């Protein structure tokens, strides 16, 4: 049996002997399109009561049936299946059947029916709820172009051969829960109008969803994909759910979806996920082999080259919402948005690979308020968990994103290791400038952690205030300039002696021998008005002292006691500030 999609129904006569009931040369020359049952004069729907009873009495379980184009009511279908019930199994058993372009008015139930041969429902239309629960299809099945107006329930059905739903339309919910697909399953250009459930289904062959459109929820929870599969490209306006699904071999998933759930999903081989629009949740996913998640900038193309429509999807970003519980050693993320990603609890986070253009959350920009005091946050990349923690602190919540409802807010002691592992990941990839922000975040969390002694917190606070943990050159240079200005002022006002010290000599004559003694008087502290001490000459001498102190050298200048101690302090502190500034610059340009 081939998997061709039939042409849409037309007013022309069908290519099988048909009933012609109700034909009118003026308005409807074709009449009823139901397959003529020989030797009777009409289709099953239009046989007389006697002829129908005679026909049904002749049927045997497993017989071939051809009811193309026939109109079935629920009662008529029930009569037909009752006549085909196998006494050994108490289930209807059909051989090869043709329900091509049949019309099923109202609810149609094929529950527990056994199809022992090929079954064709291509172009059939089901106006009510359709039930194929626990049905058994022993050969190939065609539902190409079929229309399901109500719910379609295939729960527990078994497809031993291949099944095609190409071009089918599901107006209500479609349930394929616990369905066994032993052969190929083809859902090409299928439209699901009100949710589709494949929970605990098993795909032993290829699973193809190229061009499938899910207008609501698409659930593949606990589904098993055994063989090499290429799923998609497909579109899901709502949630595409692969939670607890198992992929037994290499798989490629191409999807445009509002939300993609892969909670506790298991990949036992390589996988590539090319996505558009999706918010991806990978909580507790099991990644045994390399798994790549990449954002695709251009719309997906069908095999014929036409772009796949993406209705009602507006945000083009691919956002990772959670990596908690994931072993990131084999995970590669490319061109994704990590602004809202929950990293805490990720295993081997230091081995995570980030490629392309990725985005993380930033600190609030511009001037903010902390109580009544204005403040400005240092621009840097942060974790979403830090946003949640800071937003929970009422005094400095302005501009920080609060945690979603029901999400636990982690303390700084739990976030410091997360920053540390991300920093190591960047350092291992030789991206030192990128690692700097994570080092800053790590130090911030250590400084605010509640389990460190006050002495360590004081040291970290000083390190932060003076140089931004050795990462903010402007801060260190600013403090250096302030220290130099203060030192110059102290030197001019109190550090330099009142007058330049001049050596004096005294001699003693002893006969023909003269003894000379040369000495320098003690520096005299300056006095007089301050404005007289702020002279150009004293400024030049003070500046010389300060510049020598920055490079850890002695100026050789005679100083007062105040000046001597001031020079000692500046020779200790100012070179440290210069070194912190150099360290910060090095951290930003190091390769």
Image (cartoon, rainbow, N blue to C red):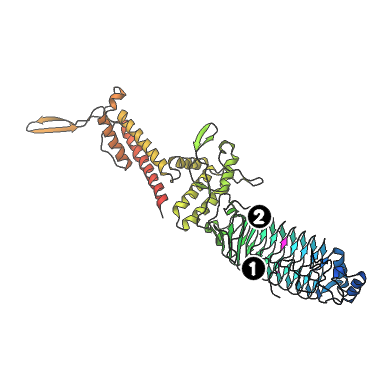
Image quadrant containing the N terminus:
bottom right
Q: Residue furthest top?
A: 528
Q: CA distance from mark 2 to mark 1?
A: 27 Å
User: Between residues 65 and 181, which one lies in front from this camera angle?
Assistant: 65
Residue 459 is left or right of residue 299, and the answer is left
Q: Quadrant of residue 55?
A: bottom right
Judge whether residue 220 can be spotted in this image.
no
The residue indicated by pointer 1 is 248
State the extent of the magenta-drawn residues as a range: 164-171
* Residue 6 or residue 575, whichever sits in front: 6
Q: Quadrant of residue 332?
A: bottom right
- Within 10 Å of disc 2 (Cα), the crowding (few <14, some 14-19, many 20+) is many
Which comes before the other along the chain, label 2 or label 1?
2
Q: Position of residue 386 (x, y in %)?
A: 56, 45
Which residue is at the front of the view, 15 or 467?
Answer: 15
Q: Which label number is shown at residue 237?
A: 2
Residue 99: x and y in percent read: 78, 70
Q: Is residue 333 left or right of residue 95?
A: left
Using the rendered image of the protein, determine whether residue 82 is visible from the camera's viewpoint: yes
């Amino acid at each position: 049996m081939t998997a061709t999609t039939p042409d849409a129904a037309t007013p022309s006569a069908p290519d099988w002997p048909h009933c012609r009931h109700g034909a009118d040369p003026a308005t409807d020359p074709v009449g009823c399109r139901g397959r003529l049952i020989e030797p009777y004069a009409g289709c099953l729907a239009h046989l007389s009561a006697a002829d129908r009873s005679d026909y049904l009495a002749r049927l045997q379980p497993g017989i071939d049936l051809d009811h193309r184009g026939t109109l079935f009511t629920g009662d008529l279908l029930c009569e037909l299946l009752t006549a085909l019930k196998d006494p050994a199994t108490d289930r209807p058993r059909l051989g090869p059947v043709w329900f091509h372009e049949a019309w099923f008015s109202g609810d149609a139930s094929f529950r527990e029916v056994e199809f022992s041969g090929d079954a064709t429902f291509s172009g059939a239309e089901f106006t009510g709820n359709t039930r194929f629960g626990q049905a058994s299809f022993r050969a190939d099945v065609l539902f190409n172009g079929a229309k399901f107006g109500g719910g379609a329930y295939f729960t527990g059905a078994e497809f031993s051969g291949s099944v095609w739903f190409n071009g089918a339309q599901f107006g209500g919910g479609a349930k394929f829960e616990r369905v066994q697909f032993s052969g190929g399953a083809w859902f090409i250009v299928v439209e699901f109008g009100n949710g589709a459930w494949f929970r605990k289904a098993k795909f032993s062959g290829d699973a193809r969803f190229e061009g499938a459109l899910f207008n609501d929820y698409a659930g593949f929870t606990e589904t098993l994909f055994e063989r090499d599969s290429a799923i998609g490209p497909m579109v899901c306006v709502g949630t595409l759910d692969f939670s607890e699904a198992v992929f037994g071999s290499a798989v490629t998933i191409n999807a445009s979806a509002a939300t993609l759930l892969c909670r506790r999903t298991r990949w036992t081989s390589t996988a590539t996920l090319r996505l558009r629009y999706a918010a991806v949740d990978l909580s507790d996913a099991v990644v045994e082999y390399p798994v790549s998640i990449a954002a695709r900038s251009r719309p997906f193309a069908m095999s014929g080259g036409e772009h796949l429509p993406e209705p009602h999807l507006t945000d083009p970003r691919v956002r990772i919402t959670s990596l908690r519980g994931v072993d990131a050693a084999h995970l590669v993320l490319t061109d994704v948005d990590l602004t809202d990603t929950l990293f805490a609890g990720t295993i081997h986070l230091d081995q995570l690979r980030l490629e392309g253009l990725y985005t993380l959350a930033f600190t609030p920009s511009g001037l903010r308020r902390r109580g009544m005091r204005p403040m400005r946050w240092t621009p840097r990349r942060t974790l979403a968990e830090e946003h949640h923690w800071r937003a929970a602190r009422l005094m400095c919540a302005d501009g920080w994103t609060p945690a979603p409802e029901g999400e636990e807010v982690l303390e700084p002691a739990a976030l410091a290791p997360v920053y540390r592992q991300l920093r190591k990941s960047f350092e291992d990839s030789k991206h030192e400038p990128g690692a700097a922000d994570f080092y800053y975040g790590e130090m911030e969390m250590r400084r605010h952690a509640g389990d460190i002694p006050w002495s360590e917190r004081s040291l970290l606070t000083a390190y932060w205030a003076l140089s931004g943990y050795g990462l903010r050159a402007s801060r260190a240079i600013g403090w250096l300039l302030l220290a130099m200005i203060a030192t110059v002022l102290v030197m001019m006002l109190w550090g330099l002696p009142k007058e330049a010290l001049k050596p004096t000599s005294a001699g003693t004559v002893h006969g023909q021998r003269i003894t000379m003694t040369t000495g320098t008087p003690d520096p005299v502290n300056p006095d007089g008005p301050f404005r007289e001490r702020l002279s150009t000459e004293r400024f030049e001498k003070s500046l010389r002292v300060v510049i020598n102190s920055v490079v850890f050298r002695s100026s050789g200048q005679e100083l007062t006691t105040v000046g001597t101690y001031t020079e000692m302090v500046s020779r200790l502190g100012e070179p440290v500030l210069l070194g912190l500034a150099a360290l910060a610059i090095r951290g930003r340009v190091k390769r």
